[in-house]
Image (spheres, helix red, strand yellow):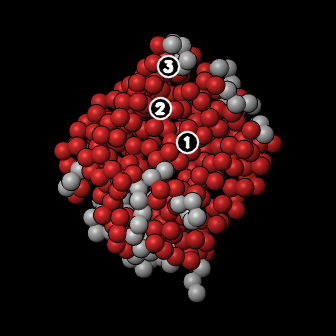
Amino acid sequence: MPQTTDLPLSTLVRMTRPGFLIITLVGCMLGMTTADMCGHPPHFWTALATVVLAVMAHAAGNVLNDVHDALSGADAANTSGIFPFTGGTRLIQQGVVTVRQTRDLARALLLVLVPAGVWLALQSTAAVLWMGAVGLLLVWAYSAPPLRLMSRGLGEVAVAAAWSLVVIGADAVQRGSVFVVPALTSLSYGLLIANILLIHGVPDAPADALVGKATLAVRCGPRGAAVLYALLALLAHGWLAWGVWHFLQPERAIWGLLSAPLSAAAAVLLWQRGQTPNRLRPALVLTIAAACMHGLAMTAGLLSMRWI
């Protein structure tokens, strides 16, 4: 039986869906910047460890999702996915790797994460332990039975919480404690990450429904998903504006509103094309771009408060 260690590095990287890992890098940058704004500049080694571990946790979640979508038959049944955005990596379905090799990679990533997370907590704050534990629980529960949150319409809630924790945790490592500013600042970013999952579920909905994977996209249908997408985008940007207006978030975090036109354009495309999902590629790209723009624009705005 071939082992994960027999696979070339390029295949191992492909198994993690590297194109999506940028959203975790952006979340870490935002969290480190909220700490820096308060007089806690990043320490190189703990900052690097934070990014590496957060990206590894995200990668583990992606790999686990491929395992459970293969076992459920969702990816095999998926003929309407927009690759490489939806429908998994397709490596199992193409015979490049086995389910066992994919599961072994997920386990290897998780085995590294636990002791490394303990080390990071010892270098910063014990709060990193519970945040890491909650994050790993969400990574596992998102796709694994018996919880299978994504199949219960709770996947978007799980990823919004997970990426909010990325921001809060990255701040806490540098600050040495949990603070309210990154918690409030993380909410809008988490909501836009939830929209990534929601819109990516639309092309996958027929296959997901076929195997009993009742995601929000399946439950709501294309039109309902479009309405919910617009509401989440409005809530994310509205929360940021309201928070800045009421001094709950730093003034220049308002730069994050630069992502609003991207979210609006994606919402319109989802409404227009949701029932012909093969035409949703531009909306998928815009959704990822909106989340990244939101996090990076807030990061730039917060940094400018120290520079200008």
User: Mark on residue 161?
Assistant: 1
Which residue: 58% across, 36% down?
A: 167
Q: Which residue is mark 2?
A: 188
Location of residue 205 (image quadrant): bottom left
State which tag comes first along the sequence, 1 or 3.
Answer: 1
Q: Residue furthest right?
A: 122
In this view, the residue in front, 67 or 282, is 67
Q: Position of residue 271 (x, y in %)?
A: 22, 43
Disc 2 marks a residue whose amino acid type is: Ser
Which residue: 54% across, 71% down?
A: 102
- Distance from label 2 to label 1 (Cα)? 11 Å
Disc 1 vs disc 3: Cβ atoms closer than 8 Å? no
Element type where label 2 sits in the image: helix
Element type where label 1 sits in the image: helix
Which residue: 29% across, 30% down?
A: 261
Element type where label 3 sits in the image: helix
Q: Position of residue 291 (x, y in %)?
A: 41, 38
Q: Is 105 drawn above or below residue 124 in the view shown? A: below
State which tag comes first along the sequence, 2 or 1.
Answer: 1
